Image: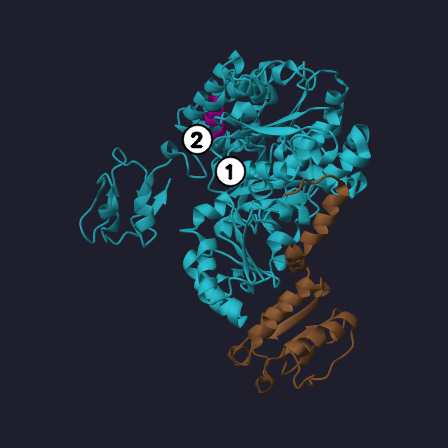
Chain colours: A cyan, B brown
Amino acid sequence: MHLLVCGGSGCHASANGDIAKALNEALQLSGLNDEIQVVTTGCFGFCEKGPIVKVLPDNTFYVEVQPEDAEIIVQEHIIKGRKVEKLLYKDPEKDEKISDSAKMDFYKKQIRIALRNCGVINPENIDEYIAREGYQALGKVLGELGDQKTIETMKQSGLRGRGGGGFPTGLKWQFANTNQSDEKYVVCNADEGDPGAFMDRSILEGDPHSVIEAMTINGYAIGANLGLVYIRAEYPLAIKRLKKALEQAKEYGLLGKDVMGSGFDFDIQLRYGAGAFVCGEETALIHSMEGQRGEPTVKPPYPAESGFRGKPTNVNNVETFANIPVIINKGADWFAKIGNKKSTGTKVFALAGKVNNVGLIEVPMGTTLREVIFDIGGGIKDGKKFKAVQTGGPSGGCLTEKHLDTPIDYDNLIEAGSMMGSGGMIVMDEDDCMVSVAKFYLDFTVEESCGKCTPCRVGNKRLYEILHKITEGKGEPEDLDKLRNLSSVIKETSLCGLGQTSPNPVVSTMENFWEEYEQHVKEKKCAAGSCKNLMSYHIIEENCVGCTACARKCPVNCISGEKKQVHKIDQELCIKCGNCMDVCKFNAVEII
Amino acid sequence: MAKIKSLDDLKKMQSDLQSKINIREQGENPESHVQIKVAMATCGIASGAKEIMDFLINATGKRNLDVVVTQTGCMGYCHSEPTIEVNRPGEDPVIYGDVDVKKADEILEKHVKRGELVDGIIPVTHKTIDETK
């Protein structure tokens, strides 16, 4: 029997202690520690209900497990074979407990390729990776395929870069392969910067060997002997597991000098990033690795011609790499059959925001937003109404109800005014004000702009200021035109991808929620009730019984009134914290 | 650790290691494998079910049998503990009573491997909820 304990960062954060250790101790007490193995795995994806513990072989899926539950799991499940009811997942719609994860809506529609080993193997044990066909793709490439056939396979598979741009991976490899040079480099882009996105971190934490194997394949295919992983220093667990995996791979002769006796040398080193968003852009990333300022430069030349130290360099994203061993093992045709014609395979999304099942999911390309948000995500929190979903991070846009049935792929998302991005998906409900959402993303880009080119450095700051003015209730109708013009100027004249896409949140919210912008400017109202300066709290006289609860709770003492008399809010003093509304039992406080 | 020198080395290593994590893949679709359930309630444990369980787990691993061994609660045949249930895919489950290590060995060799029934079967005395529908 195996007990799989999620060792991803999400579950780590929600556990108040070491669950694996507690389980081991409980097993020891019952004398079962020899028969039953406790395995720490990567992310299961169901972060909403973490920490997760899965019992095999009966596939029981326990949610929200804490170390103190270890004893009951051992006593009840392991010894007596009874499932621990209170730790089972409860289907919110049917109100019944589900013990088998395969029967949960969350997992039903998923196909796991990049995440194939996350939540299945122990990432710190190379043997478990090898037992799941690990490093066989590398063996096949070194022994049978050679560089040209490998590149051909990548091309036929239709795999496109999962970091956001969606450039065909095979083509990228071919460019680097054709360019002659004494040295070439392979770079893994693990600088995951979109707010709310954590796909790459989870893959590195849950299955580091798949990335190492793919980088080595990439190196062989283009003729590089050194691979570099550019990873954020704020991902300590991923770094730790990656380092351990590198050591093990070297020990087994799968990395380093003479890989698998083929005569091919390949080494992988880590480079730490300080977490600047712009360093996800490949030229900026390369400069940062060279010890220079993380600023992008004009393309061409593309890194495939002149990259790290001026040599041909292939930069691929973590998730792209994670797909590669499977493509080699199962064949390009197998992969190309999944998804749709122009976007093959699957995509991992980090589902976040106002959705019931926050977590990490992997679905075939062409799945609709509705399936992702309502079937897998379990719908909107607290039964509220769906308003929009933001994809592509600060470079993407907001999609609305009318896009819900659009199949998700690279091209459809761009057509709808957003983009795939690295896979962050933030769901918003009726309480989210779209002007504020645009402002939030602009705040992020202003902070993250490297400052090299004027449109991005100054333009985004101005965009932010106009948005701020609107949310403060001081917006004028001309501001909306200014937003539009400025956005198009920034898009056209910025140097790199960051600036060229930074106005997207403004453009797409203006397009889809024009009335909301108008309402803010003309009527000085925020229908979602989130812009504080555009609303005020009032007491409804008929409902107020004079219980004094609100007056006692008010942090600035702006509510006056005698006991059993109607109370009144002093609008001058009110800071709009909303405490009075929360505390009132008689629905006597309203927002106007 | 000897270095891996070829794809064949790797494949050999995989087949050696596979049995260690087979259980995780089988967990995804338990219906397609032979399942042996050991009744591990108080009555079963008191009569030595844990010893049988240990034996089955070890033996199936050593003999490379594609079998999922799990425990279950009391099946109601407390008179004949330890009891085990053998489920071959597509066949009716068979329950054996008074199982000792020798009997368990025989069950593995004959029933699990070749589908031959062995002495010691307890006749089914009840219907399951699914059957009564």
- Residue A238, horizontal then vertical, whole percent: 53, 38
Majority secondary structure in the magenta region: helix
Give the label on residue A240, or none.
1
- Residue A49 located within the stretch drawn in magenta: no
The foreground one among A109 and A171 is: A171
Q: Residues within 10 Å of mark 1 (few under 14, many from 20)?
A: few
Q: Which residues are magenta?
A: A440-446
Q: Which residue is mark 2?
A: A523
- Residue A308, horizontal then vertical, whole percent: 62, 18
Q: Chain of mark 1?
A: A
Vertical order, A399 against A35 (above or below): above
Q: Amino acid at mark 1?
A: Lys
> Which quarter shows the C terminus of chain A?
top left
Q: Amino acid at mark 2?
A: Glu
SS for callout 2: helix
- Residue A441 located within the stretch drawn in magenta: yes
Q: Which residue: 45% across, 30% down? A: A520
Q: Which residue: 52% across, 21% down? A: A483
